[in-house]
Image (cartoon, rainbow, N blue to C red):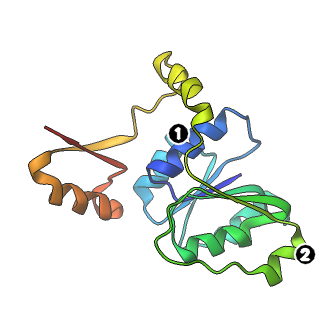
Amino acid sequence: MVVVGAGPIGLAAILGARLFSPAHIVAVDKAQSRLQAAKLFGADTTVMADDDPLAAVRSLTGGLGADVVMEAVGTPETFELCTSLVRPGGRVANIGVHGKPATLHLEDLWIRNVTITTGLVDTYSTPKLLGMLVAGQLDTGHMVTHRFPLEEIMQAYDAFSRPAQTGALKVVLTR
C-alpha cells in the first residue's frame, strides 16, 4: 500500500491502514519532517516525492505496483502519480480534497482494470475509531505539532503551508 501525502489526512490513512495489517506501507511526501512522522504512524518505507516513487514502489513489489494507493494531497500531479503507482487490478483511493481538475488517463487505466474511489468521510466507522482512540488503541499524539492562539491565525496558516521549513503536521488554533 502507498499513501501519497503525509499531512494529517495521509497520516490518518496510514494509522487506519495498520488496522488491516498490510504487508507494507510506503509514504510519499515532499517534506522530510512529514516522512519522519509517517514512520511514527506506521509507514515501513518513506520516499521523497522528488526522488523516484515509481522506482521505489516497483522495487518493493517485484515490478507490479501497489495493490492500493491513497491520494491524500489533492493536486492533479499527485493524483496522476497515484495512477502510475497502482498495479493492474489495484485500487486508487482519492481522499485528498481537490481544488483543480485532475486528468483521468483512461487510455492507460482501462486495460489495467484499476478501480478508483472517491468520497467524503465515511461516518460508518467513526464510532469504532473514536472508541479505539479513547481506549488508547490509536496513538494520534504525534499528529498535532503546533498550537497557536486564534489571534495568530495568519502565522498558523504560514507554518502549515511550509511543512518542510516548520515541521508542521497539524496546526491547532486555541482561544
Q: Which residue is mark 2?
A: 111
> Position of 123 compared to 56: left or right?
left
Name the kind of residue labelled 2 in the image. Ile
* Of the two numbered discs 2 and 1 in the rendering, the one whose residue sits closer to the viewer: 2
Asked if residue 17 is positioned above or below residue 54 in the image, the reply reads above
Could you tell me which residue is drawn at 46 percent across and 71 percent down? 99
The quadrant in which the C terminus is found is top left
- Vertical relation: 61 (above or below) 143: below
Mark 2 or mark 1, earlier in chain: 1
Q: Give the residue displayed 34% in from the left and 60% down from the top.
A: 163
Left or right placement of residue 135 versus residue 23 in this view:
left
Quadrant assignment, res 119: bottom right
Kindly check if marks 2 and 1 are in contact, taking CB atoms under 8 A apart as contact: no
The Cα atoms of the two marked residues, 2 and 1, are separated by 34 Å
For label 2, the SS is: helix
Percent x, y for residue 89?
Answer: 87, 61
Which residue in the rendered view is the most extreme toward the bottom? 107
Residue beneath disc 1:
41
Whether 43 is drawn above or below 115: the answer is above
Residue drawn at (59%, 24%), measured in percent from left and top? 128
Asked whether residue 42 is in view, the answer is no
**How far across and how far down the image is residue 80, in percent?**
65, 75
Image location (x, y in percent) of residue 87: 82, 64
Circle 1 sits in a helix, a strand or a loop, which is it?
Answer: helix
Above-or-below relation of 87 to 144: below
Q: Name, please, the residue furthest toward the top.
A: 135
How would you rate the neighbour count of disc 1 (Cα within 10 Å): few for under 14, some for 14-19, many for 20 or more? many
Question: What amino acid is at disc 1?
Answer: Phe
Count of numbered badges drawn on the protein: 2
